[in-house]
């Protein structure tokens, strides 16, 4: 009986250890599922060395400061799909070509995870954004002008204070109420909110969501630099159920 009891105890212990290891591995592999709405899909991660290449190229050649339609403030981003500057003696062109080679190589690795209606297609837009103090520090709550968006957390959040990515479930009353306000009013509401649906992304983690359905944004960066790579798929012809027209005039604050 003692031997039988001992065997049972050992067996239970082994099963417990195996299950614990399985849960630990699964949590790490699916780490991008933290706080994600059901309609937001985690994709395979971008290697850290590829992230660092993008950061090096982006910071070396600089960023455009065209006004963003979301809040009418400078974007501090690189439109990688814009190859109109791609000449041998043009730094912006060299930058775009280098960044395109990195982002396009990576795009092919997650294409197989995309929904059927965009699988195998090229993004309608690809751009690389930087958030830091004294430049663009955040992006207020908004919808994207695309059917699907893919966001890559390029920089390490360990090196940044603030700059968290947040995304509301489709139809969220809290998210919808924010879009009725001017950009600075949205920022003020978020500043005092205790229920922001933050998604804690590690460096290289990737998420896919319905761009024109999910209200989302980035909280203010107070220290360090946040970099993000974004792919847009589908424009006006790809509207999805749940889409509501976005008032760009109100978004600009005038």
Image (cartoon, rainbow, N blue to C red):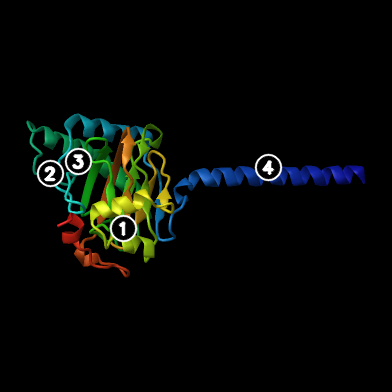
Name which residue lies at 31% across and 58% down. Answer: 119
Q: Which of disc 2 and disc 3 is earlier in sequence? A: 3
- Mark 2 → mark 1, Cα distance in angstroms: 23 Å
Residue under circle 4? 17
Residue under circle 3? 76
Q: Which mark is residue 83?
A: 2
Q: Residues within 10 Å of mark 3 (few under 14, many from 20)?
A: many
Work out whether residue 210 or residue 190 is closer to the camera in this orientation and state it.
Answer: 190
- Mark 4 → mark 1, Cα distance in angstroms: 39 Å
Give residue 254's quadrant in the image: bottom left
- Mark 4 → mark 3, Cα distance in angstroms: 49 Å
Per the image, label 3 sits on a secondary structure element best described as: loop
Name which residue lies at 83% across and 44% down. Answer: 7
Q: Which of disc 1 and disc 2 is earlier in sequence? A: 2
Q: Which is more foreground, mark 3 or mark 2?
A: 3
Q: Which of disc 1 and disc 4 is earlier in sequence? A: 4
| Left or right of 20 on screen, residue 219 | left
Give residue 224's quadrant in the image: top left
- Mark 3 → mark 2, Cα distance in angstroms: 17 Å
Q: Which of disc 3 and disc 1 is earlier in sequence? A: 3
- Mark 2 → mark 4, Cα distance in angstroms: 54 Å
Q: Residues within 10 Å of mark 1 (few under 14, many from 20)?
A: few
Q: Which is more foreground, mark 4 or mark 3?
A: 3
- Mark 1 → mark 3, Cα distance in angstroms: 29 Å
Residue 60 position in % (x across, y down): 20, 29
Give residue 235's quadrant in the image: bottom left
Q: Is disc 2 in contact with disc 1, using a CB cutoff of under 8 Å?
A: no
Residue under circle 1? 119
């Amino acid at each position: 009986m003692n031997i039988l009891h001992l065997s049972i105890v050992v067996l239970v212990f082994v099963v417990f250890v195996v299950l614990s290891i399985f849960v630990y591995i699964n949590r790490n592999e699916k780490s991008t599922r933290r706080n994600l709405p059901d309609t937001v899909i985690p994709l395979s991660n971008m290697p850290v060395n590829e992230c660092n290449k993008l950061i090096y190229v982006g910071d070396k050649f600089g960023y455009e400061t065209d006004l963003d339609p979301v809040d009418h403030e400078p974007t501090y981003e690189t439109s990688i799909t814009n190859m109109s500057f791609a000449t041998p003696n043009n730094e912006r062109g060299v930058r775009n070509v280098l960044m395109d080679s990195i982002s396009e190589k990576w795009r092919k690795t997650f294409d197989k995870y995309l929904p059927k209606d965009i699988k195998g297609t090229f993004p309608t837009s690809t751009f690389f954004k930087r958030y830091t103090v004294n430049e663009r520090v955040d992006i207020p709550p908004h919808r994207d002008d695309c059917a699907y968006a893919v966001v890559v957390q390029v920089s390490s959040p360990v090196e940044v204070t603030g700059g968290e990515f947040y995304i509301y479930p489709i139809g969220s009353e809290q998210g919808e109420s924010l879009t009725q306000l001017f950009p600075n009013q949205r920022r003020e509401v978020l500043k005092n909110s205790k229920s922001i649906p933050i998604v804690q992304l590690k460096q290289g983690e990737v998420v896919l969501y319905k761009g024109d359905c999910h209200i989302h944004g980035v909280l203010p960066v107070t220290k360090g630099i946040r970099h993000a790579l974004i792919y847009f798929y589908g424009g006006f012809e790809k509207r999805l159920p749940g889409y509501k027209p976005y008032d760009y005039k109100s978004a600009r604050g005038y």
